[in-house]
Amino acid sequence: MLISRNINLSVINSLHSILTLFKKDLLLEVRQQYTFYGVILYVASTIFVLNLAMEHPEDKVWNGLFWMIQLFICVNAVAKSFLAESRGRMLYFYTIAGARDFVLSKLLFNAVLMIVMSLVSMGLFFLLLGNPISNPWRFTGIVCLGGFSISLVFTFLAAIAARAQQNAAMMAIMGFPLIIPQLMLLMKISSVAFADVIQSGLGQLIMLLTGLDVLVIVLAVILFPFLWKD
Amino acid sequence: MRQYWWKILSIVLLLYTFIAGLLIKVPTIGNLYETIRNLFFHVPMWFGQLILVTVSLVYSIMYLRKPKPHYDIMATEFARTGSVMGVLGLITGMIWANYTWGAPWNNDPKQLGAAIALLIYLAYFVLRNSMTDLDKRGRVAAVYNIFAYFIYIPMIMVLPRMVESLHPGGKGVEGNPGFGGDSLDPTMRVVFWPAVLGWTLLGTWISTLNVRIKTLEDKKHFS
């Protein structure tokens, strides 16, 4: 009984530190307002240029463009999440929380940030590139899931890139090949929002995507402590 | 102690692959005709690539558990030879596709998977070379190697099931993403499996030679 209580206590402890670190990231974001508005501006200008280039594209082009733009948004939004932490501060986090708590809080924060960004860019897409979606609610759900999935992979790659003291270019080199399975699944899943009929096997695709997400989280939790050590 | 027998075995198996692979009577399947002989050269290279890259993964894990420089060198050189095998597999596949499908590149899921694999491992080398601190380089590269491998494997499982394929061994979208081992004709099997072993052993041989060169170079710098 004592052991189970100890486990419970450590779970509560790490949950607490994850939430605290998450809150710290959120506060920094609210106070500095650098990533959020920076990326919003990035999204808006990209989509505006797209609007000038092709006005209202076809369904397939719309879908492809949408997910490609998500990719670039993610690289920009997530890249700074580890670079912003100086060495001294990392050492400090190491003393108050474990490596696992730290990476989980980053994953959580970036996932939330990316979901917000995806929703904003979806709104801008509707506004500037027309709305070919026949089922907006379903598409909104898919967009949330997509932003979540993409952010996980890039958060971990941002940790690697930060360790190698590299910039966003390195993230793109490492990330674009690795994100392809998620991206292809997302494009396939989101094609259902363009039609009224639900394709068979949709549930299986979503399960597959969720499985990949779980895999990425597990890998991040296992591998991050090795990146952390200096 | 160095063992020679497997190097001799590799030469013998590859000689056998080339002689028997080009001379035996092959079954006629569909529109493949004589191009089916590519099975002895193209497919074993991908088997070899996968095996060498898996060896690289094992050494990366070992490096993280115990950071010995030797493990790092092993992981790098096996990944390097694996990538070379991958390039050869891609080229042999493209030559074959040019005659069978009419164009060297058809956006076939297997071709996409192959291209992605090469991109992943090229990124691995770029990442490695971007760092100068040996210890950090070994660690970060090992982490990326493990992360990439575990995404790469589900990808080559998922990708072929999502895109229609012309590639033999897969039955449309439903088919096995790799290669239909059970449907392999017995006469083909006689050459195919020795070929896989031969190419893999050759890759291992090249890798170990590179490892020895690298180790000697490092010794020169650090003594």
Image (cartoon, rainbow, N blue to C red):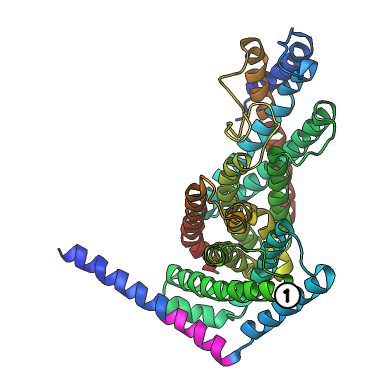
Q: Can residue B223 be seen in this view?
A: no
**What crowding class fits label 1: few (fewer than 14 Cα within 10 Å), some (14-19), or many (20 or more)?**
some
Q: x%, y% of residue A76?
A: 67, 73
Which residue bears the numbered disc 1? Answer: A128
Residue A36 in magenta stretch: no
**Observer-nearest residue: B201 or B107?**
B107
Q: Residue furthest left?
A: A1
Q: Which residue is drawn at 57% across and 41% down?
A: B157
Image quadrant containing the C terminus of chain A? bottom right
State whether the magenta stretch is mostly helix, strand or loop.
helix
Residue A21 in magenta stretch: yes
Q: Which residue lies furthest to the top in this view?
A: B25
Residue A36 as seen in the image, left or right of residue A22 = right
**Observer-nearest residue: B25 or A143?**
A143
Q: Which residue is drawn at 55% across and 89% down?
A: A30
Q: Which residue is drawn at 52% across and 78% down?
A: A90
Image quadrant containing the N terminus of chain A? bottom left
Q: Give the range drawn in magenta.
A: A20-31
Amino acid type, label 1 = Leu
Residue B50 as seen in the image, left or right of residue A219 = right
Q: x%, y% of residue B187?
A: 65, 10
Q: Within the image, what quadrant is residue A169 found in? A: bottom right
Q: Is residue A219 visible?
A: yes
